[in-house]
C-alpha cells in the first residue's frame, strides 16, 4: 500500500550488550586520580605513605584492582546524620 509504509512498525528485536566491570580489572594511578577528581600525588600518598590502598607492582608500574579501589571508597564513606541516628536506635536495647 503506497503511503502507509511510514506508519508500519519495525518488529526487530534490538539487543544491547553491556560489559560490567570485572572486579579484578586493574586501574592505573592516573585512572584512579581522574575518577576521583584529585591529583595523582593524592593517590600516591594513599598507596605509599599511609598504605591505605592496596596495589600490585608489575615491574616499575603500580596498578590497583578495581575491587580494592571500590572497597577503599566504601571504607572511606562518611555516613549521613540520618544513618548515624538510625544505627544508634538499633543499638539501644
Image (cartoon, rainbow, N blue to C red):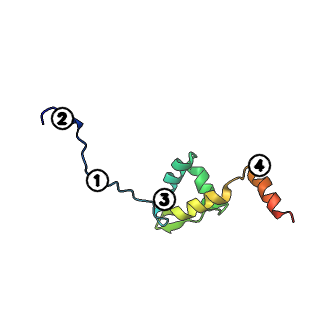
Judged by depth in the image, the label closer to the viewer, 2 or 1, is: 2
The answer to whether residue 7 of the structure is visible from this angle is yes
Numbered mark located on residue 81 in the image: 4
Q: Estimate how packed mark 4 is, as few (under 14), some (14 to 19) or many (20 or more) residues with alpha carbons within 10 Å.
A: few
Graded by Cα atoms within 10 Å as few (under 14), some (14 to 19) or many (20 or more), the crowding at tag 2 reads: few
Residue at disc 2, secondary structure: loop
User: Does 5 sit left or right of 70 as displayed?
Assistant: left
Residue reaching furthest to the right? 93
Label 4 and label 2: CA atoms lie apart by 60 Å
Disc with the residue nearer the chain's start (3 vs 2): 2
Please report contact status of discs 3 and 2: CB closer than 8 Å, yes or no: no
Mark 3 to mark 2: distance in Å?
Answer: 53 Å
The residue furthest front is: 1
Return the x and y of residue 78 as percentages of the image width and height: 71, 52
Secondary structure type for disc 1: loop
Marks 4/3: CA–CA distance:
33 Å
Check whether the beta carbons of the residues at disc 4 and disc 1 lie within 8 A of each other.
no
Mark 3 to mark 1 CA distance (whole Å): 35 Å
Q: Going 63% across and 56% down the picture, which residue do you hit?
A: 45
User: Against 4, is 84 above or below?
Assistant: below
Residue 4: image tag: 2
**View extreme (top): residue:** 3
Q: Position of residue 39 (x, y in %)?
A: 57, 47
Give the distance between the C-alpha atoms of the residues marked 4 and 1, in whole angstroms: 47 Å
| Residue named by callout 3 | 27
Foreground disc of the pair 4, 2: 2
The residue wearing badge 1 is 13
**Mark toward the start of the polypeptide (3 vs 1):** 1
Amino acid at each position: 500500500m503506497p503511503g502507509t509504509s511510514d506508519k508500519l512498525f519495525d518488529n526487530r528485536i534490538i539487543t544491547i550488550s553491556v560489559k560490567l566491570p570485572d572486579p579484578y580489572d586493574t586501574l592505573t594511578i592516573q585512572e584512579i586520580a581522574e575518577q576521583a577528581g584529585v591529583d595523582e600525588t593524592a593517590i600516591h600518598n594513599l598507596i605509599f605513605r599511609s598504605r591505605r590502598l592496596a596495589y600490585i607492582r608489575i615491574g616499575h608500574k603500580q596498578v590497583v584492582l578495581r575491587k580494592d579501589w571500590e572497597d577503599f571508597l566504601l571504607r572511606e564513606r562518611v555516613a549521613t546524620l540520618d544513618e548515624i541516628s538510625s544505627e544508634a536506635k538499633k543499638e539501644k536495647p
